């Protein structure tokens, strides 16, 4: 995993409040941040939150989706998505489960979080959730080219390290139950 030591500020050049060109200036913690010399607004670059769904059927087969769009288009992954500003991570998981798999469900368990480098956003914090299926029939949804149940013993390559982490967590959890 690539370790970030400082933020890269090449993506925001103008103040989002007044449109003045931003200047790099040290804040009250002596950290360099883009700041507006006109209105004083400071840009804080923060990690992007995402939610990932671990969905198991009664045979403990895992739901995977083949991603239709970037990042990692054409690769297998857990149903997942970026948390919208109006959502909590668990709400995002419920929405992504339905949108990508046509399965209705609820959060059964919080599986923790995982931080990782992102070539698009620099850093993503992924929240993992074990989901309980409450209805629907598995089929690929809006962001998925395919959706299928896969044995935990014969998984294809999984696109994201955070998803591999949550799959490892659920495998360990299932091993303890046996």
Image (spheres, rainbow, N blue to C red):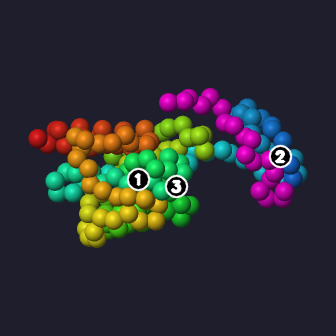
Q: Position of residue 31 (x, y in %)?
A: 71, 33
Query: Mark 1 — residue?
Result: 66
Which badge, 3 or 2, comes first in the chain's sequence? 2
Write the residue at 74% across / 41% down: 10
* Total labels drawn: 3
Category of crowding for the residue at label 3, using alpha-carbon neighbours closer than 10 angstroms: few (below 14), some (14–19), many (at least 20): few
In space, the residues marked 3 and 1 are separated at their CA atoms by 9 Å
Which badge, 2 or 1, comes first in the chain's sequence? 2
Is residue 166 in sight in this rendering?
yes
Q: Position of residue 146 (x, y in %)?
A: 38, 58
Write the residue at 75% across / 48% down: 12
Query: Mark 2 — residue?
Result: 22
Query: Mark 3 — residue?
Result: 69
Write the residue at 46% across / 65% down: 142
Write the residue at 53% across / 44% down: 124
In space, the residues marked 3 and 2 are separated at their CA atoms by 32 Å
Category of crowding for the residue at label 1, using alpha-carbon neighbours closer than 10 angstroms: few (below 14), some (14–19), many (at least 20): many
Q: Nearer the viewer, residue 39 or 147?
A: 147
């Amino acid at each position: 995993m690539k370790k970030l030591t400082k933020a890269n500020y090449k993506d925001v050049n103008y103040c989002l409040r007044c449109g003045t060109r931003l200047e790099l200036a040290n804040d009250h913690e002596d950290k360099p941040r883009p700041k507006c010399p006109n209105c004083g607004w400071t840009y804080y670059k923060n990690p992007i939150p995402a939610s990932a769904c671990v969905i198991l059927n009664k045979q403990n087969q895992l739901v995977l989706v083949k991603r239709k769009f970037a990042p990692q288009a054409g690769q297998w992954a857990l149903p997942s998505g970026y948390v919208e500003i109006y959502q909590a991570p668990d709400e995002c998981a419920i929405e992504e489960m339905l949108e990508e798999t046509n399965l209705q469900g609820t959060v059964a368990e919080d599986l923790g979080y995982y931080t990782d480098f992102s070539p698009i956003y620099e850093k993503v914090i992924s929240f993992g959730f074990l989901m309980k299926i409450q209805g629907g029939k598995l089929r690929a949804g809006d962001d998925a080219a395919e959706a299928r149940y896969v044995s935990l013993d014969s998984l294809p390559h999984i696109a994201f390290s955070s998803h591999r982490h949550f799959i490892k967590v659920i495998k360990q959890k299932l091993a303890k139950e046996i």
